[in-house]
């Protein structure tokens, strides 16, 4: 297409001179489109990674695991809502009960709500798509080859992160869509617009939480040489938080603000524990999730003084509007985003400085 | 100007640019535009360790340059610096006229690289792996498919192209690695240990392919290897690397001249009529001017080795042996000059420049 000769030694399609070619191959418009829109390197990487994820066994397994985790509470909750619905006629936000009510399996035993199960399984989802992203590439010996292609080095990590985000977004939306559809059919209640908005905000918060674990997994894959080790560390941290997290906060809280019996001490201990809890991403997500889904949650913090405690007791139970709920948990969501950004930033910097060969 | 015949010129014998005779002249005084890789004082230090020490290197279009050295001699580090994958501590590098540390993308677009122990995505087929490389190089789809078919054919993998690469042998992976480096139709090819796992017949094919690429496309190839005989066969010029230093570079003859011990050798085969003749032979041979030694081979049937100093006298000595054998009835059956092997040169070069390393080089 260019009239002037190509510079000496330049490669690519441009150097082929207009020699007698078969007319079928002459499709200038197509060629121009493909050549004038050079796709960014990270998009090429992301496309390949996304396709790999979708075809991988872990994608199918996680979809099934998350589906089962959502289906169990869903089954019990739907029954409970159905039987309670006539009595609760006129109650606000009935549809969204589906997501946050912890159902009673028997008279004494109740299991976590759909949102609760999501909180437990979400880290798995994030870690599974990231724990071997960089060190797997190293182990296969594909990293030097990949980096010797005309892309920037950060295209690799950016593309992989983008692909991971796309996949977790897809999984979350698919599972939530499945739950919603099941709910509409099973309990026969169509969500009100406000409920739908709450649901969308909750999906976004869940996405951020999973993205945080994705970034953490990516950080591990940069720092740890073996994929198996990084998987182990990632799942170890997840188990530590979800099983021993409460115990640890209690121990630390008890050590720093011992319980002596006075009300002030109890409250001091309580607020200290809460501060410690706020460092844990799973608690942050739990609080955000609760407040976004349920308009009945009016406060995510326990009162820190005796006065505040009394005040809270005297408060008339009320429902919060969506924007009020959102304001309530805005700090939690921001904190989750901050952890995500921090993890990814460290992973990014370390990856950029690592030697290609190692 | 279509995407179709992108690789078509490769099939033609006519070079894409430049003129082969110009390349021959270039050996004496290389015009700048023919230099594809050039380094001056290129140095890389890892803490106290100097991996590459003040490297001066030139590789021209239309030649295969062999980088020879033990493991850890700095070959791979040099290559990574040429690709802009690691920053030099000091010195400069120019690849296709560009500084790889400053403009890595343009350099990498025009340089095909096959790393040492090359790896591929094991759940993708060979073809899919190459497709990914083509996409990363922004090669339009049709042109990419055509290029992939061609390079697979060139490395002899067409029949296995659609099998997942985890079913490939090491040698097949190396072939695929070469194909991968060729997909982007590069001006410079950098191959790090390209043939270590390929079977002998396959190696011949690959080396022929490299020669063709150089001849037809005026490509510049930098090849690192520790397989001396392969380097000797295929490379136009050779650089000997030891402990981060390039201790010698040039053609085989130049290296032999520089690092040889100033002695030429002639292999002489005899079938003696009787024991008496056999006993006379050494004395007769040593009597020829410029012959410094004549010794029988290690086994009785082996030819004799005659050492000549200075090497320039070698032709004259051969003629003398011929007439001597005829006159004395020695039963001469073969007579040929011994080409110095690269192994010998390499050993000499390392021993002379780095006495401490001589023990390690066997």
Image: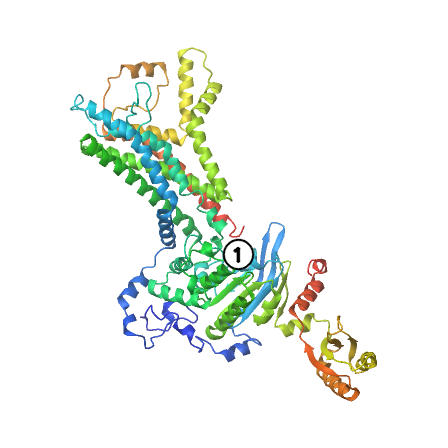
Question: Which residue reaches farthest top?
Answer: A262
> Which x, y percent locates residue B100?
49, 60
Q: Which residue is depicted at the point 35% across and 52% down?
A: A47
Q: Which residue is depicted at the point 42% across and 24% down?
A: A246
Q: Left or right of B292: which side holds A96? A: left
> Which x, y percent locates residue A142?
47, 53
A111 in relation to A152, above or below:
above
> In this orientation, does residue B254 appear?
yes
Identify the coloring.
Answer: rainbow
Q: Which residue is depicted at the point 42% across and 48% down?
A: A157
B352 in relation to A165, above or below:
below
Which chain is indicated by disc 1? B
> Which x, y percent locates residue B190?
51, 63
> Which x, y percent locates residue A337?
37, 37
Nearer the observer, B7 or A162: B7
Q: What is the quadrant of residue B183 in the picture?
A: bottom left
Q: Residues within 10 Å of mark 1 (few under 14, many from 20)?
A: some
Check disc 1 and report the residue beneath it. Answer: B117
A294 in relation to A18, above or below:
above
Nearer the observer, B56 or B138: B138
Q: What is the quadrant of residue A261 in the picture?
A: top left
The mark total stands at: 1
Q: Left or right of B25: which side holds B70? A: right
């Amino acid at each position: 297409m260019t009239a002037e000769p190509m510079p000496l030694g330049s490669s690519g399609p441009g150097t082929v001179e207009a020699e007698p070619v078969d007319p079928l191959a002459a499709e200038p418009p197509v060629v121009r489109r493909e050549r004038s829109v050079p796709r960014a390197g990270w998009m090429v990487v992301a496309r390949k990674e996304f396709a790999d994820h979708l075809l991988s066994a872990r994608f199918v397994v996680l979809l099934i695991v998350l589906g089962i985790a959502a289906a169990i509470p869903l089954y019990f909750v739907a029954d409970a809502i159905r039987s309670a619905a006539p009595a609760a006629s006129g109650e606000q936000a009935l549809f969204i009960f589906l997501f946050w009510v912890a159902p009673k399996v028997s008279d004494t035993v109740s299991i976590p709500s759909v949102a609760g199960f999501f909180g437990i399984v979400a880290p798995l989802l994030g870690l599974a798509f990231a724990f071997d992203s960089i060190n797997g590439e190293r182990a296969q010996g594909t990293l030097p080859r990949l980096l010797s292609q005309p892309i920037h080095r950060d295209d690799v990590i950016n593309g992989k992160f983008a692909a991971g985000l796309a996949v977790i977004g897809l999984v979350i939306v698919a599972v939530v869509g499945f739950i919603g559809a099941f709910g509409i059919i099973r309990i026969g209640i169509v969500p009100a617009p406000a409920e739908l908005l709450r649901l969308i905000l909750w999906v976004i918060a869940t996405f951020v939480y999973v993205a945080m674990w994705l970034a953490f997994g990516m950080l591990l894959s940069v720092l740890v040489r073996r994929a198996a080790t990084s998987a182990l560390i990632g799942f170890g941290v997840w188990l530590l938080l979800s099983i021993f997290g409460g115990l640890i906060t209690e121990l630390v809280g008890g050590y720093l603000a011992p319980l002596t019996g006075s009300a002030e001490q109890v409250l001091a201990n309580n607020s200290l524990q809460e501060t410690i809890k706020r460092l844990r991403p799973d608690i942050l997500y739990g609080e955000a999730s609760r407040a976004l889904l349920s308009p009945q949650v009016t406060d995510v913090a326990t009162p820190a003084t005796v006065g505040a405690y009394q005040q809270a007791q005297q408060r008339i139970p009320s429902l919060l509007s969506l924007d009020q709920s959102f304001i309530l948990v805005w700090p939690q969501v921001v904190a989750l985003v901050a952890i995500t950004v921090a993890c990814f930033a460290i992973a990014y910097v370390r990856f950029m400085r690592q030697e290609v060969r190692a | 100007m279509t995407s179709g015949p992108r690789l078509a010129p490769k099939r033609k014998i006519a070079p894409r640019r430049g003129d082969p005779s110009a390349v021959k002249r270039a050996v004496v005084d290389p015009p700048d535009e023919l230099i594809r890789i050039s380094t001056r004082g290129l140095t890389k230090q890892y803490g106290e360790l100097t991996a590459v020490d003040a490297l001066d290197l030139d590789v021209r279009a239309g030649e295969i340059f062999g980088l020879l050295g033990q493991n850890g001699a700095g070959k791979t580090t040099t290559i990574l610096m040429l690709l802009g994958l690691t920053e030099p501590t000091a010195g400069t590098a120019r690849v296709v006229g560009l500084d790889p540390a400053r403009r890595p993308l343009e350099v990498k677009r025009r340089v095909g690289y096959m790393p040492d122990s090359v790896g591929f995505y094991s759940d993708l087929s060979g073809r899919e792996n190459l497709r990914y490389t083509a996409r990363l190089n922004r090669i339009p789809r049709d042109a990419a498919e055509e290029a992939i078919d061609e390079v697979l054919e060139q490395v002899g993998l067409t029949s296995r192209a659609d099998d997942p690469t985890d079913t490939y042998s090491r040698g097949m992976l190396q072939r695929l690695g070469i194909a991968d480096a060729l997909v982007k139709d590069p001006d410079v090819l950098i191959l790090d240990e390209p043939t270590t796992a390929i079977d002998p017949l396959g190696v011949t094919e690959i080396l022929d392919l490299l020669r063709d690429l150089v001849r037809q496309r005026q490509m510049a190839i930098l090849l690192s290897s520790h397989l001396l005989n392969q380097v000797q066969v295929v490379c136009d010029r050779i650089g000997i690397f030891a402990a981060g230093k390039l201790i010698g570079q040039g053609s085989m003859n130049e290296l032999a001249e520089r690092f040889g011990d100033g002695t030429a050798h002639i292999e002489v085969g005899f079938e003696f009529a009787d024991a008496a003749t056999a006993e006379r032979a050494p004395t007769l041979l040593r009597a020829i001017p410029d012959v410094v030694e004549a010794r029988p081979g290690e086994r009785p049937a082996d030819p004799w080795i005659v050492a000549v100093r200075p090497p320039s006298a070698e032709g004259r000595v051969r003629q003398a042996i011929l007439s001597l054998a005829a006159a004395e009835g020695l039963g001469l059956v073969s007579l040929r000059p011994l080409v110095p092997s690269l192994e010998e040169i390499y050993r000499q070069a390392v021993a002379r420049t780095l006495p401490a390393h001589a023990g390690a080089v066997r």
